[in-house]
């Protein structure tokens, strides 16, 4: 059954106009009055609904019953990712959402190819958030992970706004513990990793000074986007 993100107050029996993006998708799918669909607004669970009216550019639906369905990972894994360039960041956001990332913080580091600021950064954040929404519609998640505004690594570390929990730095440095072992068995986890070329020695040192413990995914050197999904597979699907 088609699923659509509808960030509006939902209640059984209400007749509402879908937001423009969802309405456009309903029209592309050629749904008709009486056809069933599923809505979620990010506040938990999902709602059955039926198409009530199809306009030229708008769609109205009648909201049905609420189902308290949650498909979140058992453990909250937050990502702070050195932004890979080109379409790789889009791919990273999509796959990280599917694998259950609790939030995504794009990071600019010394070796970053992609550098964003001002209006361009705001546009990319909106673009990535839309990718996360679409991934939730596809994979069945009812809570959309927030994709934060891009920040320089030094600014992000200085702000210290990370939630409480285990802080891990993906690193190839000698003595790094295996990721699963370093993460322990419970509680939220922040996983930080660099962009193409990794973090510099100074950046890794700054992260360690902020409480990030070096952890390893093994001896192979993974691409920036691969490291994120590998970490989520190790921690989020366990």
Image (cartoon, rainbow, N blue to C red):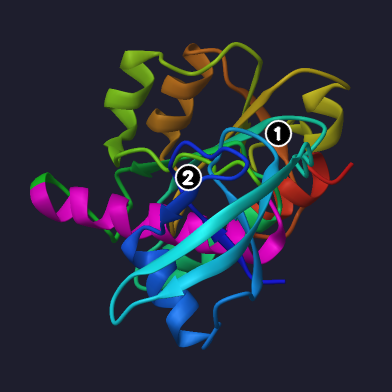
Compute the Cα span from label 1 to label 2: 15 Å
For the N terminus, the image quarter is bottom right
Is the C terminus in the top left, top right, bottom left or bottom right quadrant? top right
Residue pictured at 14% horizontal, 55% vertical = 120
How crowded is the residue under tag 1: few (<14 C-alpha within 10 Å), some, or many (20+)?
many
Report whether 20 appears left or right of 30.
Answer: left
At horizontal 61% and vertical 36% (from top left) the residue drawn is 102
Q: Name the residue tied to disc 1.
A: 215
Reading the image, the residue beneath label 2 is: 81
Number of dots carrying numbers: 2
Q: In which quarter of the image is residue 12?
A: top right
Could you say whether the residue bearing mark 2 is in a helix, strand or loop?
A: strand
Numbered mark located on residue 16 in the image = none
Tell me, yes or no, whether the highlighted magenta stretch contains residue 137.
Answer: yes
Residue 95: x and y, percent?
A: 62, 61
Q: Residue 187: percent from the left, percent from the top?
A: 76, 17
Nearer to me, 8 or 218? 8
Give the vertical position of 77 relative to 141 (above or below): above
Percent coordinates x, y for residue 42 in the rendering:
55, 40
Q: Give the camera-side residue of 24 and 179.
A: 24
Q: Give the range drawn in magenta.
A: 119-141
- Frontmost of labels 1 and 2 is 2
Is residue 121 in view?
yes
Magenta segment, prevailing SS (helix, strand or loop)? helix
**SS of the residue under disc 1:** strand
Mark 1 vs mark 2: which is more N-terminal?
2
Q: In this view, does 214 lie to the left or right of 233?
A: left
């Amino acid at each position: 059954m088609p699923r659509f993100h509808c960030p509006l107050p939902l209640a059984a029996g209400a007749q509402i106009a879908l937001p423009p993006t969802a309405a456009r998708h309903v029209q592309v799918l050629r749904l008709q009055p009486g056809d069933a669909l599923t809505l979620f607004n990010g506040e938990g669970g999902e709602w059955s609904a039926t198409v009530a009216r199809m306009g030229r550019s708008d769609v109205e639906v009648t909201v049905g019953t609420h189902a308290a369905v949650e498909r979140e990972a058992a453990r909250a894994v937050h990502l702070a990712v050195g932004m890979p360039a080109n379409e790789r960041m889009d791919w990273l956001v999509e796959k990280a959402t599917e694998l259950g990332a609790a939030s995504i913080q794009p990071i600019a580091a010394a070796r970053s190819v992609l550098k964003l600021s001002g209006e361009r950064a705001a546009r990319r954040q909106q673009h990535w958030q839309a990718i996360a929404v679409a991934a939730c519609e596809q994979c069945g998640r009812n809570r959309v992970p927030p994709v934060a505004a891009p920040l320089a690594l030094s600014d992000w570390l200085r702000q210290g706004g990370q939630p409480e929990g285990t802080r891990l730095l993906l690193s190839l440095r000698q003595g790094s513990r295996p990721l699963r072992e370093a993460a322990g068995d419970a509680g939220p986890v922040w996983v930080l990793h660099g962009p193409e070329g990794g973090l510099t020695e100074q950046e890794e040192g700054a992260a360690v000074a902020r409480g990030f413990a070096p952890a390893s995914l093994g001896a192979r050197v993974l691409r920036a986007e691969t490291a994120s999904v590998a970490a989520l597979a190790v921690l989020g699907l366990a």
